[in-house]
Image (cartoon, rainbow, N blue to C red):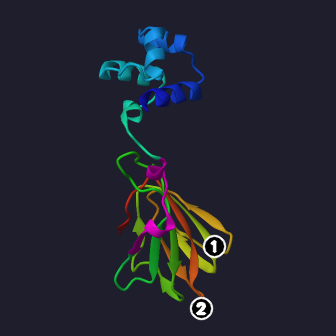
Amino acid sequence: MLGEKIRAYRKDAKKTLNQIADATGLSTGYLSQLENNHVDPSLSALRKIAAALNLPVYLLMEDSSNEDYVTRKKNRVVMTFPDSPISFEVVSTLPNKTIIPSAMIMYFTQKSHSFDTDRFLIHDSDEIVLIEKGELTLYYGSNTIVLHAGDSALIPRNTPHRYHNHTDEITSGYVVTAPCTLPRNI
């Protein structure tokens, strides 16, 4: 309930009822009643409390469950493209009514002897690639590097890049982008 949520955020912030009362102009008695779900706050009171806790007000107003923050394997979004040798599964939580993540994690597999795209890609986010199995040649900017299982690389935002699986085996791994943006061809 709302009162327990406010109390949890207040305790996480290591603030007392008196400190919140001083910061908001609300009485400690009112705040105590609020945290014990004896009264319903006005929007104005919620705004003041959120500001005192340095939180966006929507975090206090939302009715979320832990499932909003969990991506079950069976529910992962799979992205494949026609005639493309690479496929992605979105491992991280996608934007929903509760959260807009600032990063995205995807699991990928890439067929042998293939490039991920016909042209270099660019996007307005940093990208980290981690090879789980196999090898991959990474072309980014003016650099070329071979990544082996367990290796990772950072591709800075707005850096043209593409992947080449130069082996006879499928390569798999993880890609993290932050913030979440879609790539574009150049």
Where residue 23 appears, as percent x and y from the top left, is 46, 12
Specify which label sits upstream in the sequence, 1 or 2.
1
Q: Is residue 117 above or below residue 157?
A: below
Q: Give the amino acid type for the residue marked by disc 1 in the picture.
A: Glu
Element under label 2?
loop
Residue type highlighted by circle 2? Asp
Q: Residue at 60% x, 88% y: name it.
A: 167
* Horizontal and vertical percent position of residue 11: 58, 25
Q: Which residue is mark 1?
A: 132
Q: Position of residue 162 (x, y in %)?
A: 48, 73
> 10 Å neighbourhood of mark 2: few (<14), some, or many (≥20)?
few
User: Camera-side residue: 15 or 154?
Assistant: 15
* Residue occupying the far front of the picture: 38
Quick check: 80 above or below 4? Answer: below
Label 1 crowd bin: few (<14), some (14–19), many (20+), radius 10 Å: some
Q: Nearer the viewer, residue 100 or 145?
A: 100
Q: Residue at x 49, y 29 (%)?
A: 4
Indicate yes or no whether the magenta region holds residue 68.
yes
Q: Please tell me in which quadrant of the rendered image residue 51 appears.
A: top left
Q: Which mark is residue 168?
A: 2
Q: Nearer the viewer, residue 83 or 43?
A: 43
